[in-house]
Amino acid sequence: MSRNSDANMKVGINGLGRIGRNVLRRLWETRMHRCVHINDLNPDIENIAYLILHDSVLGRFPGHVRVSGPRQINLESGRERWQIQVSNQPVIKNVDWSGVACVIDSSGVEANALAARDLNGPGHVIVTHSFTEADITLVFGVNEKAFDPSRHRVISSSICDAIAIAPVLKAVSDQCGVEQVFITTMHPWLSYQNLMDGPSRSDANPSSTYAYYPLGRASVGALIPKPTTVGKVLESVVPALKNRVLSFSYRVPTAVVASADISLVTSCAVDTRRLETMLLSLNERLVRCSNEMLISVDYEGETASAVVDQRWLEVRDERYVKLVLWYDNEFGYSSRVVDILDLICK
């Protein structure tokens, strides 16, 4: 995307956690839209500025970050100047979103997502998780052409696993049909996990803990098997996969970059070359292919939804297919959130 100092849309971010800060970084990189308001539970504005400037995964912010008042942070680089109002409201409806065209709710709190439709001012709200009450769950490479800005005010940007896997499976399904899909995802730890054993507190419902007790085990030294919603989400956005997906996940002790190991059975005969040609023809901004001998850390900062690792692409007996995908579960996902802003503008 080209840089443009005249932002097309003024944006508010509700919840400046991992996804919120990644979205802010991507907005600053593309310069197509401008963040003008941040609402976060953190009452310490100096700490908010510090976390924007210094990031253990993304590195130092590519610009100056300074607190310019009790409720304002400035981002500056060359001629680019952003003045961002900062508020500290626990409830999204209590925030004054005046002048904001679109709010990105990256708080992860279910109550905020449910309240999204009642916000005064913003024309659209993007919820950065799988939210069944949304007007549309939007996955690029799958259903972006169905988006109608006049009807779809509350938009779910789905989950990182689904936006990576769905475009690939839809392409295979359209090409030769899919009978069954078996997915194992390896997902980095998340903020609600623990350094030491204990209850795992829910982000979606902050007053409760997860009933799946293994999520409360120490995250840094173990693989934690867990259920995943990716199967249901995939079936909802790619109807041809209905009742054809089995999925399973490991929470792994790394900070960022996920992987999906996919085995599937096609409806018709296919060979490795045909499948590879089809995958190479996909939009590289969303799905690209690589045969380099890379590991997870090499995909940090990847803006594509998924990278197909061609080394492991294989077809057996004309119908049994193995696929391995890599995706930056934070920055790649956040790149698609910013793409939704572009779609709204169009």
Image (tube, grey):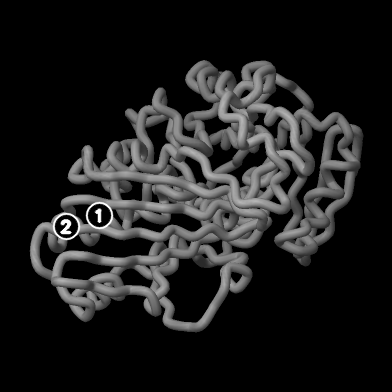
Q: Nearer the viewer, residue 170 or 147?
A: 170
Q: Residue at x 79, y 63 (%)?
A: 60
Q: For residue 137, what is the image quadrant?
A: top left
**Residue reaching furthest left?**
268
Helix, strand or loop under label 1: helix
Direction from residue 310 to residue 125 in the image, left or right: right
- Residue 98 visible somewhere in the drawing: no
Q: Position of residue 341 (x, y in %)?
A: 48, 46
Compared across the picture, whether 191 is left or right of 126 comes to right
**Do the residues under discs 1 and 2 have CB atoms within 8 angstroms?**
yes
The amino acid marked with disc number 1 is: Lys
Out of 35 and 166, give the one closest to the viewer.
Answer: 166
Q: Which mark is residue 170?
A: 1
For the point 63% across and 57% down, which residue is it?
256
- Residue 76: % across, % down: 79, 57
Q: Is residue 322 left or right of residue 67?
A: left
Residue in front for this viewpoint, 19 or 254: 254
Spot the residue most to the bottom. Answer: 292
Q: Position of residue 13 (x, y in %)?
A: 64, 37
Task: Tell me the CA gap for discs 1 and 2.
Answer: 6 Å
Q: Amino acid at mark 2?
A: Asp
Q: Residue at x 42, y 73 (%)?
A: 309
Q: Is residue 124 above or below residue 25?
A: above
Name the residue: 44% across, 68% down: 307
Residue 179 lies, with reference to residue 156, above or below; the image says below
Count of marks placed on residues: 2
Instruction: Provide the residue designation for mark 2.
Output: 174
Mark 2 crowdedness (10 Å alpha carbons): few <14, some 14-19, many ≥20: few
What is the quadrant of residue 276 in the picture? bottom left
